Structures are given as C-alpha cells and as structure tokens.
Image (cartoon, rainbow, N blue to C red):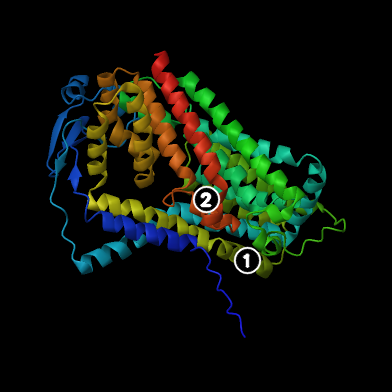
Amino acid sequence: MTTATKKKHSFPSAYTVIVIVLILVQALTFFIPSGKYSTLEYNAGLDKFVITDASGKTVKKSATQATLNKYKIKIKVSKFKDGTIYRPAAIPNTYHQIKKPKRGLFGTINQFLTAQVQGIVDSVDIIVFILILGGVIGIVNATGAMDSGMMRLSEKLKGKQKWLIVIVTSLIALGGTTFGLAEETIAFYPILIPIFLLAGYDTLTAVAAVYLGTAIGSMSSTINPFSTVIASNAAGINFTDGLPMRVLMWFAAVGISIVYTIHYAEKVRKNPSKSLVADQAAEDKEKFLGDMDLTTQSDFTMRQKLSLIVFALGFVVMIYGVQQLGWYFTEIAVVFLAVTYVLIFTAGLKESKFVSSFVSGAGDLLGVALTVGLARSVGIVMEKSFVSDTIMHYFSNQISGMNNVLFICVLFFVYIILGFFIQSSSGLAVLSMPIMAPLADVVGIDRSLIINAYNWGQGLIGLVAPTGLILVSLAMVNVGFDKWIKFVTKLLIMIVILILVFLSVGVLIK
C-alpha cells in the first residue's frame, strides 16, 4: 500500500501577489463609475490659478485669496506660491461622473501590460538606486570587509541583542515621523540582516525592526512635510495643530511595536523552531552569511576598515541630503555611485574582480528593483480609469451626517481604504483634504482630527498593502508575504484599537 505524498503549496511570490492585486483592481474599474473633481493648480510662470473641470476644460483665474475663497478652498494663497501645495487641489462639490474610457478585450490587456511597463519607467530613479546599491554591496562583500565587520559587531552585541531592535526601530521611526524616511530604508537591509542573524534572530525580525520603524514612524507623522504638513496646509490649518496628540501616538505606537518585535525575536533566539521562517533558516544563513566562519577570529585589515568607513559615509550623506537638502533617489543614487569610485582605491581588488562583484551585486537586487516598478502599476490603472475621485466622493457622502465620534472613527477606516489605492501620501492629502476637512466643521470637531485620521489610516495600511513598500522589503529579506501577515496581524489589531481610542478621546476633549 502506497501513501500519496502531499504537495506543499507555497505562497505566491511578490511579483505574483502584485499581479493578482493588479488584476483585481483592473476588474473593479469595470464596476466603479469613472468620475473627476474639478481641480485648481498654481502656474508659477503665469502667476495664475488654472482650473480644470471634469471634462478637461481649463480656465485661468487670478492667483489670489479671493479666488480660493470663491472655490471654497480654505488654503492660504502663499502655500501655492511657495510650492508647499504643488499638486492640483480638488475643488469641493464639483464631482461629476464622466464617460468610462472604452476598452474592449484588447484595450484591457493593453492597459494591463502597459501599466506594468509604465510603472517600471516611472520608478526608474528608485530602480537605478537599488541596482547601484547592490553593486556597492557586492564590492564591499568581495573585500571581506562585511564579514569581518559583522563578526566584530556580533561580539559587541552578546547579551545586548534587544538593544539592536530598540535602536534600529526607534531611529528609523524618528526619521519617518520627521522627514518621511521610507523607501530609503531599502538600503539598510543588506547591512542589517547579517547582524540580526549573528545576534541569533531570524530574517523576519530584521524586516520587522526596519519596516515597523518605517511604517509606524510615517503613520505617526508629527512634522513630516510629505504627509502632516501638506495635509494640514490643504485642510487650511497650521501643521502644529494637534501636534501633542501626534507625539503621544508616536511614542505609544512605536513603543508597542518595539515590545512586540522583541517578544517575537527573543522567543526565536531561545528556540529557533519558534521562528515563522524556521523552514528556510539554513537557506537564509547561506544566502546572507555565506561561508563566514563563525568559529575563528579573522583579520580585520586596514583596507577592509577603510572600505566599510566609505560605505558607511554614503549612508550619512544620504540621510543628510534627504533631510536637509530635499534629495530624492536620483541624488541618492549619485552618492552611492560616487562611493563605488572611491572603493576603487580602498578595496584593493583587481579590475576584473571589482567589476564582476559590482555586476553580480546589482544582479542580486534586480528582482527587488522590478518589484518596485510593478507595485506602481496598480496606481496607474486607477489613474487611467478615473475611479479614485469616485471612491472619494462616495465615502465623503456616506460619512457626512454621522455623529462626531462615529464620524472620525469611520473616517479612519475610509483612509485605510483610500490609502490602499492611493499610495502617495501627498497625493492623497491634496486630493482628499479640500473635500474631507470641511466635514469636520459640519459635525463639530477640530480639523486637526481629520489630519490624524488621514495620517493614521493611510499609514497603517502600509503595513500590509501589496501596493506599497512591504513587498519590496520582504523581497530584500527573502520572507514570504504570508509569513509577514501571520507575524503582523496581532500588532495590527492592537494599533487599530489604540488609534480608535486616541481619535475618540480627541473628539471628547475638544
């Protein structure tokens, strides 16, 4: 008698998950009516406001406060002229359905394929940065500097492993809440994963420490110019309104995330079989630690030290440029390309070894780079189908007559849904705030609570939305999306309860 062997069904890869989401969103566009709000945009060259209606017709108006008041947009005109509001702002009460773009079978297939290519094209700056970063890491690894440096660090961490999680998560969350540190954290994974593994943790702990810092920090934005500041300006209030509550939320949410991660990580360190990725532990060690000899003390040469210092300085310059100079991925890629040229003199590698190490390192992150572009394709389908404004219009109508506590709690969930489809925090702010902020006046609550519901809703969905950064992060650490969902679900529920308490208290104390 023979026993049938059950086939083990693995969870789909990041690419497949994104394509599935893309297909589902594409299907939804057939059922959700197309529609648009009229928009108002400042043209600096003309010093005029350009009003674009749902049909695409434009008119030019004087760039004055009176014009904004006429269109019931409670934003200071100076915010348009100084570039703070740089996206077209939706004009309240101007939503109109438009004729759905004709697409037959061929058109649908064409949009499905074109959106993916366009997503990669639109993300080319991030993709180039990831490939150059991979190349630099390949060179540093070829010198043996990474292995030697990690061994020294692991010795220092003995008995203090928990502090690794506390420090990494806190610092990244601080960057998220102040200047929107997000995609840039991709650069940290190749360095941090070996450190976490040597500390006795697993790859899931590494992604938790980094990504929870990114997501929870950005969710709890205090002075982040790409979310809190631009949303407050679009709502017609000062970004310092409601700041104390946002600071408290940052400490509470980040604190819970750190404790949650440490609880899991220590359980894994004491009993590796408790790891959610225990089935791939050997594979992960081979991939991220390679043939590193953990039993012998290796030499840490001056060339290796210099190479690591140059590599580390690249991150210092990156963080300074992003925070102080407003750099984005083109400038960051230039920094690490410069690091590559400096490494020519410090690495001590032969020309052929240097080039092959750069190419193989870039190749290791090619899959991650493509994931970034594919994730962007979902938003492109939404834009081309003109359904984002329809979703916004529907929800604003549904919540406008609610009790104030119920209103703000439901609005939080509305922003979770909107944040899933519209991943750009600044884009969602400018699109939604002129519509949602006046509803606060109707139900009698402070507009700063609208900002909080927006921040916490669109930020929280980033923990699990395949259209966001999570799949890219998981691809970096070789962790499946299903394992992440299993890990983060309880934390997600705790943060939702925390947010609902904060929002309810915020209404009651005003």
Viewer-nearest residue: 195 or 10: 10
Q: Does dot 2 land on a helix, a strand or a loop?
A: helix
Q: Residue at x 71, y 67 (%)?
A: 350
Task: Specify the amino acid type for callout 1.
Answer: Val
In the rendered image, the quadrant that contains the N terminus is bottom right
Q: Where residue 85 appears, x then y in whole percent?
A: 32, 31
Q: Is residue 362 above or below residue 2?
A: above
Q: Using residue 360 as the reference point, say whether residue 85 is left or right of it.
A: left
State the separation of the CA atoms marked 1 and 2.
39 Å
**Residue furthest toward the top?**
510
**Residue furthest toward the front?**
1
Residue pointed to by mark 1: 355
Residue pointed to by mark 2: 485
Q: Using residue 293 as the reference point, say whether residue 27 is left or right of it.
A: left
Q: Where residue 160 appears, x then y in whole percent?
A: 78, 39
Q: Is residue 6 above or below residue 153?
A: below
